[in-house]
Image (tube, rainbow, N blue to C red):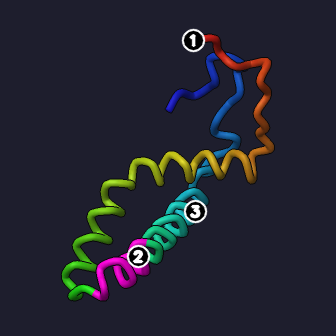
Amino acid sequence: MPEKCPVCGFRYEIELGFYWGAMYMSYGLSVLIVLVVGVSLYFLANDPPTWVYLTTVATTVIVLTPLLFRYARVMMLYFFGSVSYDPKYQRQL
């Protein structure tokens, strides 16, 4: 992750250890995914054996870990870093 935004110059790490809280957000998102996948398996697969739950949930969380990590940091910035989106700074691709 870059130190500053190349467009507006915003410093991403507002204070030392700012993103430690993102670990808790990532954990919460992982728990949400486990619940959604578990309940979905229960209803859609007609309560499969335990190994199917474990395999499916573990695979889903492992595959989505990079997204969870990234979105937890983004949520941390938006909720606690007083960051708001301004379309005038959007890059033209």
Q: Circle 2 is placed at which residue position?
A: 40
The residue nearer to you, when weighing 22 against 15, is 22
| Residue type pointed to by label 3 | Met
| Residue at the image position 64 percent from the left and 51 percent from the top | 75
Q: Circle 3 is placed at which residue position?
A: 25
Question: What secondary structure characterizes most of the magenta part?
Answer: helix
Q: Is residue 30 above or below residue 42?
A: above
* Quadrant in the rendering for residue 74: top right
In space, the residues marked 3 and 2 are separated at their CA atoms by: 22 Å
Q: Is residue 28 above or below residue 14?
A: below
Q: What stretch is highlighted in magenta?
A: 37-47
| Residue at the image position 29 percent from the left and 69 percent from the top | 58
Q: Circle 1 is placed at which residue position?
A: 93
Residue 86 position within the rendered picture, expressed as x and y whole percent measured from the top left: 79, 27
Kindly indicate whether the residue at mark 2 contacts the one at mark 1 (C-beta within 8 angstroms).
no
Q: Nearer the viewer, mark 1 or mark 3?
A: 1
In space, the residues marked 1 and 3 are separated at their CA atoms by: 31 Å
Q: Is residue 66 left or right of residue 19?
A: left
The residue nearer to you, when weighing 23 against 55, is 55
Q: How many marks?
A: 3
The quadrant in which the C terminus is found is top right
| Residue type pointed to by label 1 | Leu
**Residue 3 is one of the magenta-drawn residues:** no
- Identify the secondary structure beneath mark 3: helix
Kindly indicate whether the residue at mark 3 contacts the one at mark 1 (C-beta within 8 angstroms).
no
Residue 19 position within the rendered picture, expressed as x and y whole percent measured from the top left: 59, 51
Disc on the earlier residue, 1 or 2: 2
- Identify the secondary structure beneath mark 1: loop
| Residue type pointed to by label 2 | Ser
Residue 45 position within the rendered picture, expressed as x and y whole percent measured from the top left: 29, 79
- Identify the secondary structure beneath mark 2: helix
